[in-house]
Every structure is written in structure tokens, then in C-alpha cells.
Amino acid sequence: MKVATWNVNSVRTRQDQVVNWLRENKVDILCLQETKVVDDNFPRSPFAELGYHIYVSGQKSYNGVAIISTEPLEDVNTGFAPLIGTSDLDEQKRVISGTINDVRIVNVYIPNGSSVGSDKYTYKLRWLTALQEYLRLLLYETSNICICGDFNIAPDDRDLHAPALLTGQIMASDLERQAIAAIVNLGFADAFRKFTTEGGHYSWWDYRSAAFGRNLGWRIDHHYLTSDLYAQAISCTIDVAPRKLPQPSDHTPVIVEF
DNA sequence: ATGGCACGTATCACGTGA
């Protein structure tokens, strides 16, 4: 099974690119982030015409997640509420989950955090604490979990183009990295690092400063797998091709196969 | 030096992203 994640920075703006990518990359699951559209306005038909099922949790202008699946998903739900109860953290649409072939797919769009010490940074850390609790409870229900999405965190210095400059800044601060480590310690592993240990591989490049052309990137889009799935993983790759297109998203897809 | 670019909004600038 192939599971891809892609922050598309508006699914309506990127609609043709996403559909074309799906035609050429027959993944079973595509997790989207930053769809930036309310559910009623999600462009369902081009995906349905390819035979995909569509599950969405969106809002106006900001955030929004979706799962595109070859097969119908079971037990689809959104937000943290199903496991940890009602929370103000669910006002922003950042979590959608469903089951396929006894694998629980959890698609997340982790908050950006703005800058270390800001109110948004505090929100990001709160959100990460909630995610940790959500996953801890989910592990009582199933042992096969693939959590993927835009984490907005570079787990270690290999995931940054300029660690000396960027370590400690937003997306590379100690508390954010500790939050990732706490999730890993629940029983997950970073699928990409099973196959690639060196640095220089990124999933996001700033639109500004011609960052992509100079490979000034960050690896912030990840798949974390429970132990059996991790053992079964046979590849995890970053497809940089969509980032080269005209009017691209600033992120590019990452694909795991297990 | 907080800049650079892109997105959505009933814009003609702003908030947000990372």
C-alpha cells in the first residue's frame, strides 16, 4: 500500500496539479493539508472521476485536511474530539482519520507556530501535547497506525539546509523537537529515515529567495509508523517534480510504501 | 535589518503561512 502526504496550499488553486499527480502516481491514499476550502466547496468531482473516495475537514481560508482513497475508508472521524473530548483545538481543521486494510491513517496539519515564544508557538506546543495524548489513546485501539502530514518541524539538523542558522528557530526549536520525540517514544518511527540517513533531502522550500532552485529546504512533511508497519515499509521517497511546476505549492509530496 | 513570495478575502490591503 502506498500512502502519500502533500501540503497543497489551496486544493482549488492546485487542483489540476494534484489530479495529474494522482494519474501518474497510483497511490492508495493521498493525505492533503492546507486545502483552504469549506467542505461544500471541495472540488470532489475530478477525484471521483479517477475512482477515488474523498473525505474532508475544511474551513474558510485557512488550514483544512482531506484524505483521498482508492477504497472506502472505515470509521472516518475528524479532530481530536473522538478520543480526547471537546477542545478549542478542534476549531481549526487539522486532523482527519480513517481505516483502510486494518491500518489507521491519521492525517495531520500541525500548526506553524510563527516564531519561538509567540502566542502561536504556545498554541503549537499545546496542539502537540494534545496530539500525543490522542495517539496514546489510539494505540489502545489499534497497533497499526500511519500518522502523516505537514508537521512543521524538522526533527534534527539533517532536516535543515542551514542548521547553524536555523536550529532553535521556529520548526527547529528544542520544545518542538521534544514533542516529536515524545510521539516517537509512544512507539512510532520516521519512515523516511529507515531508508535515507544523510541530510539534504527536503519537502518544503520557501517561495521567497529562490529557495527551491538553491535547495534551501526543510524536511517537515513526515510519515510515522508503528513497529509492524515500519518493519514492512519498503520505501519512503520525496517526489520533487511537483515543486518544479509553474505556480507550485511550496511543499512537495512524500510517499511511503509498506 | 523581518525583508523576500503566495494564498484567500467581496482586496484594491491584510492576516497567515514557514
Image (cartoon, rainbow, N blue to C red):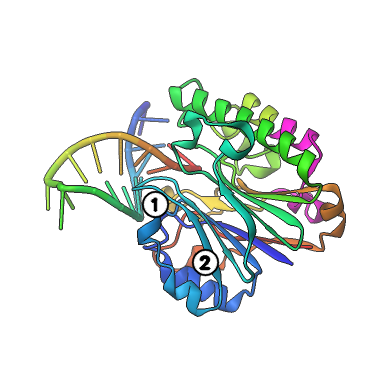
In the drawing, does residue A170 fall left or right of residue A12? right
In the drawing, does residue A228 fall left or right of residue A243? right
In x, y percent, where is residue A61? 34, 48
In x, y percent, where is residue A3? 67, 62
Which chain is disc 1 placed on? A
Q: Are marks 2 and 1 in contact (CB under 8 Å)?
A: no
Alpha carbon of mark 2 to alpha carbon of mark 1: how far? 19 Å
- Which image quarter is the N terminus of chain A in? bottom right
The residue shown at (37%, 63%) is: A13
Point out the tag, 2 or 1, that comes first from the N-terminus. Answer: 1
Circle 2 sits in a helix, a strand or a loop, which is it?
Answer: helix
- Asked if A215 appears above or below A168 in the picture, the reply is below
Residues in magenta? A180-199
> Is circle 2 on the same chain as circle 1?
yes
- Asked if A95 appears above or below A73 in the picture, the reply is above
- Which image quarter is the C terminus of chain A in? bottom right
The residue shown at (81%, 47%) is: A143
Asked if the stretch drawn in magenta spans residue A192, the answer is: yes
In x, y percent, where is residue A10? 40, 56
Which residue corresponds to mark 1?
A36
Mark 1 residue type: Lys
Q: Quadrant of residue A195?
A: bottom right
Asked if the stretch drawn in magenta spans residue A10, the answer is: no
Which residue corresponds to mark 2?
A242
